[in-house]
Amino acid sequence: MIDMLKFRPHHFLCTIGYEGKGYSEPFTDNYDKIAEQLRVPDGDQTEIQVVFHTDDICAPCPHQRGLLCATQKKIASLDRRHCDALNLMENEILMWVDAKKRIKQKISIDTFHEICKGCQWKALGVCEEALRKLHENNEL
């Protein structure tokens, strides 16, 4: 178990909808571990630091280029939109439960469609479905 995770701004919402798909087997193996850590009963207490470069999810991604991404312009745009929508600040640390609350409070379905514009995974519908479920969940 990782003590504190580092997430790019768009990975907060990606993790809500993550279902075991990714760019490569090492990528999905890594993301599976991160998602599992957050989904266990005490996973809500996991601390996450906001970063504006490659993060713990990106670590084994075949598109990683040091601290950047091969598609950096597109990723930076996604991060900027998510950062603005979620009111995140660089190096901010929040617990996963608080990140989910913030997503629920600040990201409507319409907002999702705007901030995730251009994401290749959006068409799968899993993130939208996960966001709908988060909005229906009264436990947060």
Image (cartoon, grey):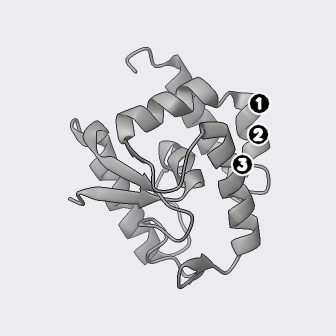
Which residue position is annotated with label 1?
110
**Residue type, numbered disc 3:** Arg
The residue drawn where x is 40% and y is 33% is: 98
Which residue corresponds to the image point at 60% horizontal and 38% vertical from the top-left? 86
Residue pointed to by mark 2: 113
Can you give x and y, in whole percent of width and height, for residue 106 in the image?
62, 28
Foreground mark, 3 or 2, reads 3
Tell me residue 52's x, y (percent).
Answer: 57, 64
For this view, does 79 lie left or right of residue 40?
A: right
Dot 1 falls on a residue whose secondary structure is helix
Q: CA distance from mark 3 to mark 2?
A: 11 Å
Q: Residue tagged by mark 3?
A: 81
- The disc, 1 or 3, on the residue closer to the chain's N-terminal end is 3
Q: CA distance from mark 2 to mark 1?
A: 5 Å
Pointer 1: residues within 10 angstroms few (<14), some, or many (20+)? Answer: few
Residue 127 x %, y % = 60, 42
Q: Are marks 2 and 1 in contact (CB under 8 Å)?
A: yes
Quarter placement of the C terminus: top left
Report the side of 108 relative to 140 (left or right).
Answer: right
